[in-house]
Image: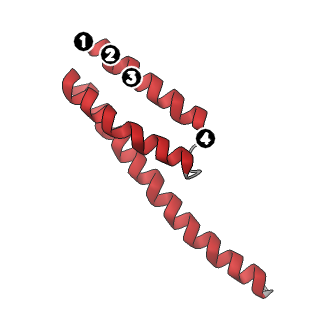
Amino acid sequence: MANSPQAKKRARQNEARFAVNKARRSRIRTYLRKVEEAIASGDQAAAAAALKEAQPELMRGVTKGVLHKNTAARKMSRLASRVKALG
């Protein structure tokens, strides 16, 4: 447990940051799930639209430090190839 004032403040900041990051990760996963569901339904137009919506969310996760840029790039690449294969 934190004892010094600095450590107590840092603990508070960490909790707040954890909550923000958790919300961001959840939001990203929701967008990715929408793409997955569209791919599973077999509708290429819907899958492409969902992918277009998910892309900025993934990149925002990178800029905010929630995801590594290579992780986001890999996810985008794999989803894009799967969407393209539907057609």
Q: Quadrant of the N terminus?
A: bottom right
Label 2 with label 1: CB-CB less than 8 Å: yes
* Callout 3 amino acid: Ala
Q: Which sits in the foreground, 60 or 29?
A: 60
Earlier residue among tags 4 and 1:
4
Q: Mark 2 sits on what residue?
A: 84
Q: Mark 3 sits on what residue?
A: 80
Outermost residue, right side: 4
Point out which mark residue 68 bears.
4
Whether residue 24 is visible: yes
Q: Which sits in the foreground, 28 or 52?
A: 52
* Callout 1 amino acid: Gly
The residue lying at 56 percent from left, 64 percent from top is 18
The residue lying at 59 percent from left, 72 percent from top is 15
Label 2 with label 3: CB-CB less than 8 Å: yes
Q: Secondary structure at mark 1?
A: loop
Q: CA distance from mark 2 to mark 1?
A: 6 Å
Dot 1, crowdedness within 10 Å: few (<14), some or many (≥20)? few
Task: Determine which quarter of the picture holds residue 50.
Answer: top left
Label 3 with label 1: CB-CB less than 8 Å: no
Q: CA distance from mark 4 to mark 2?
A: 24 Å
> What color scheme is it?
secondary structure
- The answer to whether residue 45 is left or right of residue 70 is left
Q: Secondary structure at mark 3?
A: helix
